[in-house]
Image (tube, helix red, strand yellow):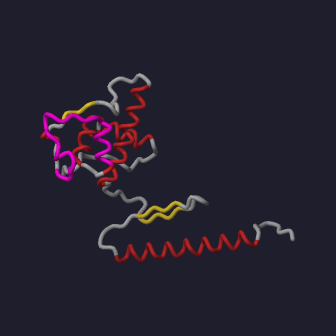
């Protein structure tokens, strides 16, 4: 059998199922949004066909600890730049001596280190920041990397509305 202008019956059936599932997903998210006591933002990208679902896709939301991923990316970006000869860029192996004034709440590991004595690397700070979401480690890296550098890296990656605005635990 030769079909003109369309896919196979199996493909059409698969496409129909995908559309039904997509519709169910949209309905469930809308129902959650109506019941949610706050502002819900959702972004879904179908990796097979590129279809997207955005709920309040143009809203700007606070990043909280997820911004730490951008800090980590900038650390590795600067490490890469320093390997190509750029001066003044942070390296993973750069040492930091723990300072009491850098310690903030939400720092389970850093608060246990001895200020003025304990020396750790940027790699150690990054590990604490990501593995246990240590806020003091994040703040030290923000200071060492520069807020403007993190934001430039985000913008160059196409994330124009994602910004690091302040250190952790600063209101």
In magenta stretch: residue 111: yes
* Residue at the spot 18% in from the left edge and 37% down from the top edge: 98
Q: Quadrant of residue 142?
A: top left
Give residue 129's position: percent from left, percent from top. 29, 47
Q: Which residues are magenta?
A: 105-130
Task: Name the quadrant of the N terminus.
Answer: bottom right
* Residue at the spot 37% in from the left edge and 76% down from the top edge: 34
Give residue 121's position: percent from left, percent from top. 28, 35
Q: Nearer the viewer, residue 164 or 67?
A: 67
Q: Quadrant of residue 60?
A: bottom left
Q: Residue furthest right?
A: 1
Left or right relative to 17: residue 85: left
Give residue 87's position: percent from left, percent from top. 35, 23
Q: Nearer the viewer, residue 155 or 138?
A: 138
Q: Quadrant of residue 28?
A: bottom left
Left or right relative to 4: residue 25: left
* Residue at the spot 83% in from the left edge and 69% down from the top edge: 3
Left or right relative to 36: residue 52: right
């Amino acid at each position: 059998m030769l079909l003109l202008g369309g896919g196979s019956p199996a493909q059409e059936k698969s496409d129909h199922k995908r559309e039904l599932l997509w519709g169910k997903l949209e309905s469930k998210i809308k129902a959650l949004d109506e019941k949610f006591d706050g502002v819900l933002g959702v972004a879904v990208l179908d990796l097979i066909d590129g279809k997207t679902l955005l709920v309040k896709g143009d809203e700007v939301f606070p990043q909280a600890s997820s911004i730490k991923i951008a800090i980590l990316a900038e650390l590795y970006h600067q490490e890469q730049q320093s390997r190509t000869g750029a001066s003044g860029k942070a390296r993973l192996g750069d040492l930091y001596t723990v300072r009491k004034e850098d310690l903030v709440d939400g720092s389970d590991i850093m608060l246990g280190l001895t200020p003025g004595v304990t020396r750790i690397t940027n790699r150690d700070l990054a590990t604490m920041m990501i593995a246990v979401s240590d806020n003091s480690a994040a703040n030290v890296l923000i200071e060492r990397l520069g807020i403007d550098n993190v934001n430039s890296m985000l913008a160059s990656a196409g994330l124009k509305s994602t910004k690091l605005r302040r250190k952790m635990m600063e209101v």
